[in-house]
Amino acid sequence: MMFSHFPTVQRPRQAWRGRVFGALLGLTCAAAAPADELEDLPDFGDSAGAVISPEQESQLGLATMRELRRYAPVITDEEVEDYIQKLGMELGDKSHYYGDFHFFVIQSDVVNAFAVPGGYVGLHSGLILGSKSESEVASVLAHEISHLTQRHGARMIEAAKNMSIPTMAAFIGAIVLAAVVPQAGLGAIAGVAAAQQQYQIDFTRANEKEADRIGIELLSKSGFRTLSMADFFERLQLANRYSDPRMIPEFLRTHPVTVNRIAEARERAERLPSKVVREDSYDFLLIWQKLNVMSMSDPAQARNYYEAVLRDRNYTNEAVARYGYVLALIEGSEFVRARRELAGLLRENPNLTAFRMAEARIEERAGNRRLALELYRKLHELDPKSRAAAYSYAALLIHTRNGLAAKELLRSFGSTEQREPRFYKLLAEAELILGERANSHYDLAEYYRGLGEIELAAEQLRLGQVVPGLTHYQRLRLDARLEELERDLNRLDQDRAKRREREERRRQG
């Protein structure tokens, strides 16, 4: 029996894919490694301070994200990214966490979620599509946030305290990938070290109960339905109790659920004071449609799905269903029909960012660049905080060779502390148009660094070093970043050499 999502029409779904060695990082847990595998790797500290510091957690989180961006299908659609970050921060802001949170979505039919030390929380798109409400998605985020606030992941690493941050990051990334694309994940794990496949990263019951308890309190503080966590767990369990064990959703493997645990979560939620529960946000309904279209195997399948939904009136909100239909038509390059469908939505809600983004994308995809530029410009003025609007506008400015406007737009947008790889890619392209070769090489290095391609990043910095006419500041900046990357490369080379040496000893012994 397959677990279905909240609309009444059954959407096409692929079979559950992949199983991780041990459980995926939800995160938190005990990991033990053979002593001879770790004896010569850096030590995080003595037993009195074995739990890694917040700074080391941050380093691990960044390194793991680079591994994930390099190998896993992390969704880079800014509308999806902005939504999940906003939803996550509504919960995270009430958690009293000592660091920053970073929420993201992986494109995968697998129903799963995980957290990585350093404040990183990932959801699989299959989990969002498999949720009946925004409160259920929030309940999973609250659970993962609670693992982070209680530092369960740091305690996992305490059990393997001799493992270096690059090695641990590579291993965590490989485990996550194995749940999404099994063959690629297995290859990545083998690349870290054959013996590390024996790690069992399992949740302890105490950690799970603690994350449930604190997560339910976060739901209550944020106005979400507190019973949603128990409902989600129970529905997953019931929907698969008679299935082939190999088809059990990954979430149940990585977050073991028992009848007692569900009952305790429900009892805990019912004990909290009754509050007015917030309804599903319009953003959630729209993002659900976007992810639904992205999950389809081809545009024709998506178009046929939405035509059936609209024909049979099998929806809870017609405008939301029509938005999904517009996205499907855009993907199929049916721009005339897409314009016609979208016109009605814009008449009813002319200032909604999602509808205005769709309008601009239709014209851009149809080749009407001048009109698309004007639509993006107006949308950026209307919603200056929208990354989707800003980045799409900047990208089209670059394509029309207006590098100066693109650079000014990017430089003025967002926080300098919250810039992701695509920002640097766009900035590097704008600088190249302007003839700022050294700056372009530096920012392209930042792009590759964010993707985990350290060798390519170092190569860009070396190219920047030989650009004629470097200023003193540019040279210092290039040299400092290259020195940092070369240290990372040296650590990776040392790790590889040690693994080869251990494997050779194992073959000979």
Image (spheres, rainbow, N blue to C red):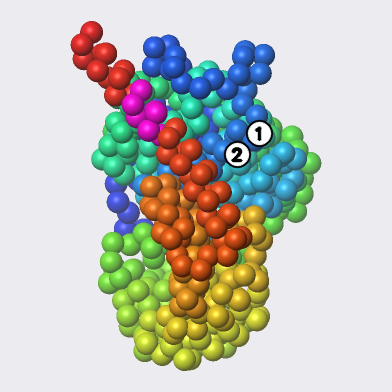
Identify the mark at residue 126; answer none if there is no mark.
none
Badge 2 is on which residue?
58
SS for tag 1? helix
Up-down: is 184 above or below 430?
above
Q: Position of residue 20 (x, y in %)?
A: 36, 33
Most common secondary structure along the magenta stretch = helix
Answer few, some or many: residues within 10 Å of disc 2's Cα (few below 14, many 20 plus, some between 14 and 19): some
Q: Position of residue 209 (x, y in %)?
A: 61, 27
Q: Position of residue 26 (x, y in %)?
A: 51, 35
The residue furthest right is 273
Q: Position of residue 188 (x, y in %)?
A: 32, 37
Badge 1 is on which residue?
54
Up-down: is 459 above or below 402?
above
Magenta stretch containing residue 181, yes or no? no
Magenta stretch bounds: 492-498
Amino acid on which the number 1 mark rests in the picture: Pro
Query: Is 340 left, or right, of 376 in this rendering?
Result: left
- Disc 2/disc 1 C-alpha distance (Å): 6 Å
Q: Quadrant of the C terminus?
A: top left
Can residue 496 be seen at all in this image of the molecule? Answer: yes
SS for tag 2? helix
Magenta stretch containing residue 493, yes or no? yes
Up-down: is 402 above or below 132?
below
Up-down: is 140 above or below 505?
below
